[in-house]
Amino acid sequence: MPPKKKSASPKRKKSGTGSAAKKGKKKGKTTPTKVENTGHPDDIFPLVLTSATQERFGCRADEDVTEKSPHKLLKKDDIIQDLKTRAAVSDFSPVKQIVLDYPDDELLLVFDTDFVYGQCFYLVLTPEAKERISNILPPQEPDTSEAFDEEAICKTPESKPWISLGSEHEIDEQSVKETREKLCFKFSKVRRKFGLPVSFSDRNTADAKDGHIECASNHDSRFSIKQMQRDCGIQAVSRLQSSSAQTQWKLPRNVFTQYTPIEYSYEEKEKILQCEDLKNFCNSVTPRFLQALQQERITNVFFDDWDALGKAAEDSDWSRKVSEGLMLYQAFTDQNYTKDKKISSVNWHPTFYGVIAVALTDLNPEKKEEQLNKSATLVFKASLILFYSFSDPSVPQVVLWDISAHVALLQGTQPIKKVPGSTDLFDLEDNKEIKTPVVRFCAVSALESSHKAPITDVQWLPPTFEVTKTGLPVENKSNISTQVVTCSPDCAISFWDVRGPKVSLSASDRKQNVDQKTPYSVPDTFKHLDRTWKPLFRVSLPKIETSGEYASLKFSMEHYTCTTNNAAQTTEAANENDDSSAVVPDNSSHIGTSAKTLTPLDDVNTKLFIGTEVGEIIYTDWKMMKDDPGRLQSAKSLHCFSIHKRQVNTVQRSPFFKDIILTIGCWNFAIWREGAMDGPIILSPSSDRVCTVGCWSPNRPAVFFIGKEDGSIDVWNLLEKIIEPVQVNAHITNSKITCIKPWTASPKQHFLAVTDDLGTLRVFEIPKLLYIPSKNESLNVKKYLMEVEEHRMQDLLKTEELWKKTKQEAEELTKRKDDDKPLKSVQNEDPRMLEETILRSIGLWPTTADTQEA
C-alpha cells in the first residue's frame, strides 16, 4: 500500500509557556497559533480530506458541500475525537494544537472548488476569520470569455516536500522478513561419473525392496494452528435456463398511436443559443474535435494491428489463410432476357461442371394484368429458363425442356456461332447477330387439366419408385425418374407422368417420326404430351375441422432408397444399350409399362409436409382413399400447425436425417421431426428482417443458410447458437434474395448460388469453416435434437396434466353450482304451456293478434 501523502503543514511558532496558555484559556481569551505563510492567509489552513473523513464529518465534495454552498461547521469535540482515534493518520493532525486551542465549539470548513489555496478544503483558524468568511458570498465564476492565459494553463505544479504521517509503519508491518538463518546444502559427485550416458527404464516398485517411500500425513499434537484467515477465489455465474413462449396469432386489427414531439419555443431556443456556457463549451472543444477529425482522415484508428501482423508463425503463409465468410466467385446477368424479370428458381446441373439453370418470371404480374385489362393488343415477353456456365459467364444459354442438342455448348467445348438469316430456331426477337440459341418447349400440359394458379414448387419423384393413379407406390424397374409432383395455391397437388400411353408402332412409322421435323427444330421427345398432358391424379387438401382447403406453396417428401438389386442391374443394362450417337432419342423409353406387372412397395413413406400461404404447416398423405360409395377421394390432412405468421417459402428435409424437416416463414424458422407431430422441436425467435428462402448445408448436418429481404444471408449452426446466427453475410445483393442453392464441385471446392428479384445470379465460394464438419458432428446433432425433443415432451406432458387438472376442477365447480339450483319438475306441467315455451324460444310462436284470431 503506497504511503499517504499530505500537504505540508506550516511550523507553528511558540506563543508562550504551557502555563501561560492555560491561564489565557481560563480567562476565555486565546491568541491563535500562527503558522508559516505558504501563499495563503495566516488565519486559514488548506487541508486534504480523504473520502472516509468526508463521509464521517458529512462534508462530501459536490454532495454535502458544493460551489454554491461551500461552508460546513465542524464540531470541535468531533475533531478531537478523530485525533484521539486515528492519531497521526488523522487528516486534522497538522492542525492538532490549533484545534485544541480554538476558543469556540465549532470550526468553519470551506470547500475550495477552484483550488485557490492549493487544496480542495481549508480550515478557518480564528473566530474573526470565521465570521468574516461566513458573511462573504461564494466566489463567482471567472469570466471565460476572455482569452485563456496559456502560461497559467501550461504551468507545471511544484512538488512539495514529503511529510510522514505514519503510513510507512503499515507497509513495514505487511512486509515479509526473514527470522532465521539460511540453510546451506552442498551436493557433490564423483568426477569419473561426469558425462556418462544415462539410461532410464520403467521399474515396478512392488518388485524392489524399498522401491518407494510413502509420506503419509499425520497429526502432530505439538502443533495446533487454528486457521483464522483463508484466501480463496469465488466467481459468480448466472444460472442458465432455456425457456420459450409462444403467442397464438389472432386476426389483425387496425390500431394507431399518435404523439406530439416536445419542442422548445422560439424564445427558449434563442436563450440557449445566446448562453455563454454553450459558447465557451464550443470554443473549448472545437480545436480537439477538428484534431480528431484530422487524425481519423490521416489514419484508421480502428485498424487492428495485431490481426494484421498475424498471431502464429503459419500466418506468414498468405496462401493458407481461409476466409470465414462467403466469397464472390462469379456473377451472371443478361439484360436482354432478365429485364423486368425476377428469378423464381435455381438449380445446378447434376453432371456438367459449372452449369446453372435459373427460371425467370414477371417482376410485377399485377401491373401486367392491369395493362391487359386496358388493352387487348398487349404483347407478352416469354419467361425463359437461362443456363449459365462458368466457361462463358457473359452469355447465358436459354433452353427449355430438352437440352440434348446443346450439350457441347453448355460444357464450353463449342463456341457460339453466328446465326444465319434462314435459321428455323424459335427467335423471340428476330435478331440476326451473334446471340444465345433459344429452344422452344417440347410439351405443355392441357389447359383444362392444369393448375388454376401459378405453380410454386416442382419436384421429381426419386427413381427408386413410381405411383399409380390411386397414389400407391410401386417398384420402378427402369430406375429412371419419369414422374413429377407440382403444387399450387389452387389447393391441389398434382402427380404427372412424362411417359405416353403404350402403343405399337411399325418400323415405317418409327422411321417417319425420326425424319419428321417439328416447327422451330424442337425435339419430338415429348411430342406425345404436347397440349394433351394431364395429371396422373390430383390430391386436394381439405381442412381438418372446418370447410375449405389449404392453399399450398411448398412441399417436401421423403426420398425412398431401394433395398433390392433390381435397380442397379437395370441401370447397368441401360448403360450398355445406350447409343450416344443417335440424333433423335427413341420414344420407346418413354412408353410406360402397366402397373399390374409392378410390385407394390409398402415401406415407402407417402406423407407430405406442406407449407401454405398463411404460414401453416400441413402433414398429409397423398394416397387416395375410398368413401362409402367406393369413390376415390383425398384424405383429410393429419395435422395442421400455425407456426409462421405469413407465407411459407421453404420446406426441406435434411440431407443427413430423413425425418428432420426445416420450414421457413417470413419472420422465423422451425425444425420438425417426423413422428413427433405435436409441434416443432425447435422454433426460432422472430427476426428483424423478413426471411425469404433457406436451405440445408449438403456437407455439415448442423449448418443451414437463410436468405433475407435486405440481401443478406445468415448462417446458422445448431451446435453453437440457436437464438442467433453464427455468421451474417450482409449486403450480398442490393435487393431481396429469391433462391439459394449449394453445390459441391469437388471435395475442396463448394459453391452457393444466390439469386435476387432483379434477375442477377451470383455464385459464392463457401469457406472451409462452413463445409468441413466437426468431429462427430452428425452424432452430436442427432443427440442434441433428441434431447430437445425429450425436454419438449416433458413440458408438453406437464402442460397437458395441468390443463386436465384445471378442466376437472372447472367441471366439479360447475356441477356443484348445478346441484345447488332447485330442480323444476316438468312432469306435472301442462303440455300446452310446454309447447308454447319451446316455440317462443325458437321464434315460431305466433303474435298476439294471430293468437286471438285462432
Image: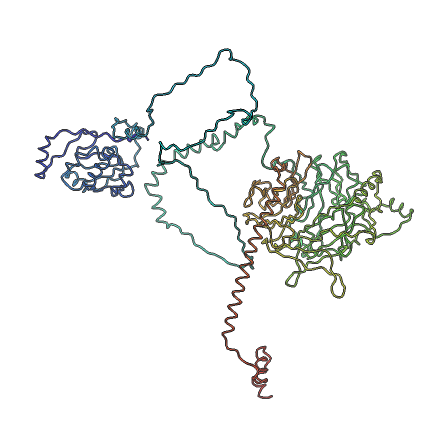
Q: Nearest the camera: 240 or 347? A: 240
Q: Nearest the camera: 166 or 24? A: 166
Counting from the top left corner in percent of width and height, residue 316 is at 56, 25
Q: Is residue 712 visible?
A: no
Left or right of 183? Residue 394 is: right
Query: Which quadrant: the N terminus?
Result: top left
Could you say which quadrant of the image residue 727 lies in?
top right
Left or right of 657? Residue 141 is: left
Counting from the top left corner in percent of width and height, residue 433 is at 75, 38
Query: Which quadrant: the C terminus?
Result: bottom right
Counting from the top left corner in percent of width and height, residue 747 is at 68, 34
Q: Nearest the camera: 408 or 840? A: 840
**Could you tell me which residue is drawn at 55 percent across and 61 percent down?**
804
Counting from the top left corner in percent of width and height, residue 126 is at 15, 37
**Could you tell me which residue is drawn at 74 percent across and 65 percent down?**
628
- Which residue ends up furthest to the bottom in the rendered image? 853
Q: Is residue 622 visible?
A: yes
Above or below residue 54? Residue 443 is: below
- Which residue ends up furthest to the top in the rendered image? 192
Q: How many marks?
A: 0
Could you say which quadrant of the image residue 231 lies in?
top left
- Which residue ends up furthest to the front in the rendered image? 209
Q: Looking at the image, what colour scheme do you see?
A: rainbow
